[in-house]
Image (cartoon, helix red, strand yellow):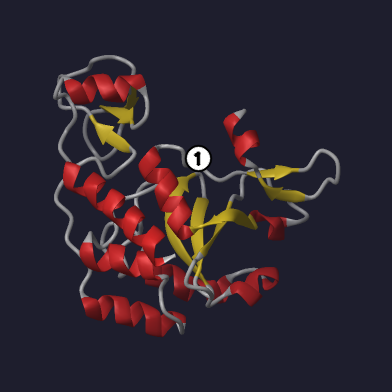
């Protein structure tokens, strides 16, 4: 496990050092090589956004048409300890190392890992832990075990189970959940945090999705095959 963590950490660090540490990059003002999505990211004019892993992204990157991402600042040791004390258990080793050595969030899957502490711009890992007091009753047994890591938009989140150092992944997807059974929005995934980050580096990680099994009618997380077919 430690060896796997080391290999994945070095791969993540290489991506951070390359400046390509988010899955979405804005194009430079006035530059548009085609294939991007026009979106208003902040107050002001719309910008062209490119998604890593697409031909349009590769073309814009090669042409120098992507706006550079700012350098990351690692989280202070005290913030990591504060998070672990709030959670009542240690972070998975690879996650802890990513925060201490690479950045206090802002990189990785979705819109990037959450920062540990609240910021003026949005939520945080510790803020999400405190909000677990408001979780539905069916989720309460997982409170204090799951740590929210990132969001994908539309209320979809990825979480890590900190009860074991390997850190099994979970997700929340409220979109297809039936009104009479909202508890199914929280579901486990089939891989660990280390594998989650490895897939992100490789460009094979897909946004989690809640689906209803056609045979059993049970709500569950989509398989890799089902995600690939969407």
Q: Secondary structure at mark 1?
A: loop
Q: Quadrant of the N terminus?
A: bottom left
The residue lying toward the viewer, choosing from 125 and 12, is: 12
Q: Quadrant of the C terminus?
A: top right
Residue 36 in percent (x, y) is at 32, 22
Determine crowd level at label 1: few under 14, some 14-19, many 20+ residues with C-alpha closer than 10 A. Answer: some
Q: Residue, x 30% and y 76% (percent of image)?
A: 80
The residue lying toward the viewer, choosing from 206 and 180, is: 206
The residue lying toward the viewer, choosing from 27 and 193, is: 193
Residue 86 visible at all: yes
Determine the image quadrant of residue 95.
bottom left
Residue 121 in percent (x, y) is at 28, 57
- Give the residue number, with chain letter if any, for mark 1: 206
Residue 180 in percent (x, y) is at 78, 54
Q: Residue, x 60% and y 70% (percent of image)?
A: 135
Determine the image quadrant of residue 55.
top left
Residue 118 visible at all: no
The number of numbered badges drawn on the structure is 1
Q: Residue, x 22% and y 17% (percent of image)?
A: 32
Q: Is residue 195 above or below residue 124?
A: above
Q: Is residue 8 above or below residue 92?
A: above
Q: Is residue 138 above or below residue 171?
A: below
Determine the image quadrant of residue 65.
top left
State left or right for residue 212 relative to residue 66.
right
């Amino acid at each position: 496990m430690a060896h796997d963590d080391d290999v994945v950490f070095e791969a993540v660090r290489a991506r951070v050092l390359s400046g390509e540490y988010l899955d979405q990059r804005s194009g430079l003002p006035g530059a548009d090589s085609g294939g991007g999505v026009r979106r208003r990211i902040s107050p002001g004019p719309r910008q062209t956004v490119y998604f890593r892993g697409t031909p349009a992204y590769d073309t814009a990157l090669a042409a120098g048409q992507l706006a550079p991402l700012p350098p990351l600042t690692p989280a202070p040791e005290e913030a990591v300890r504060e998070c672990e004390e709030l959670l009542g258990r240690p972070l998975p080793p690879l996650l802890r190392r990513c925060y201490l050595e690479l950045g206090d969030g802002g990189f990785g899957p979705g819109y990037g890992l959450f920062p540990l502490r609240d910021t003026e711009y949005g939520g945080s890992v510790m803020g999400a832990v405190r909000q677990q007091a408001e979780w539905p009753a069916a989720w309460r047994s997982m409170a204090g075990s799951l740590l929210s890591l990132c969001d994908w938009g539309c209320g979809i989140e990825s979480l890590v189970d900190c009860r074991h150092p390997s850190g099994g992944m979970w997700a929340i997807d409220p979109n297809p959940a039936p009104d009479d059974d909202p508890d199914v929005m929280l579901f486990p995934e089939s891989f660990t945090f280390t594998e989650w980050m490895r897939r992100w580096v490789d460009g094979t990680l897909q946004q989690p999705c809640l689906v209803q099994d056609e045979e059993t009618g049970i709500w569950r997380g989509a398989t890799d095959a089902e995600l690939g077919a969407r």
